[in-house]
Amino acid sequence: MREIPISKFKATCLAVLEEVRRTRTPLRVTRFGRPIAEVVPPSVTHPEIWLGCMKGEMRVVGDIVKPIGAFDSWKPARR
């Protein structure tokens, strides 16, 4: 793990954070030679796209196009 003094971290904070994100290597910030913080890369996140989120979760059983058959016994209401 790479170490960097706090004064250098403060001066180059944005560049150091971008380097940690890009290289995915953690960094230890020290003050007077003692560690005070560790900067770690973000965890991998998956985009929150809802389209297709249920893929593979359902199973079709039988014919889903044919009527269910309950309408055969119904009689239409006539006035």
Image: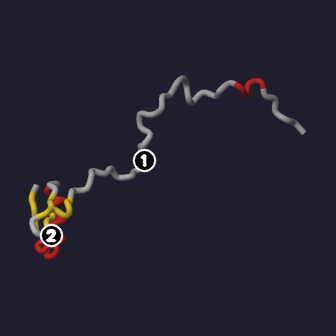
| Local secondary structure at mark 2 | helix
Disc 1 designates what residue?
Answer: 51
* Mark 1 or 2, closer to the camera: 2
Residue at x-position 34% and y-position 52%: 47
Quadrant in which residue 32 is drawn: bottom left
Q: Position of residue 19 (x, y in %)?
A: 14, 63
- Among numbered discs 1 and 2, the one appearing first in the sequence: 2
Residue at x-position 78% and y-position 28%: 74
Residue at x-position 55% and y-position 25%: 63
Quadrant in which residue 79 is drawn: top right
| Local secondary structure at mark 1 | loop
Disc 2 designates what residue?
Answer: 15
* Label 2 packing within 10 angstroms: few (<14), some (14-19), many (20+): few
- Which residue appears farthest toward the right when viewing the image? 79
The three-letter amino acid code for the residue at tag 1 is Leu
Q: Position of residue 55 (x, y in %)?
A: 41, 37
The quarter of the rendered structure image containing the N terminus is bottom left
In depth, the one of 4 and 69 nearer the eye is 4
Residue at x-position 11% and y-position 73%: 8
The mark found on residue 65 in the picture is none
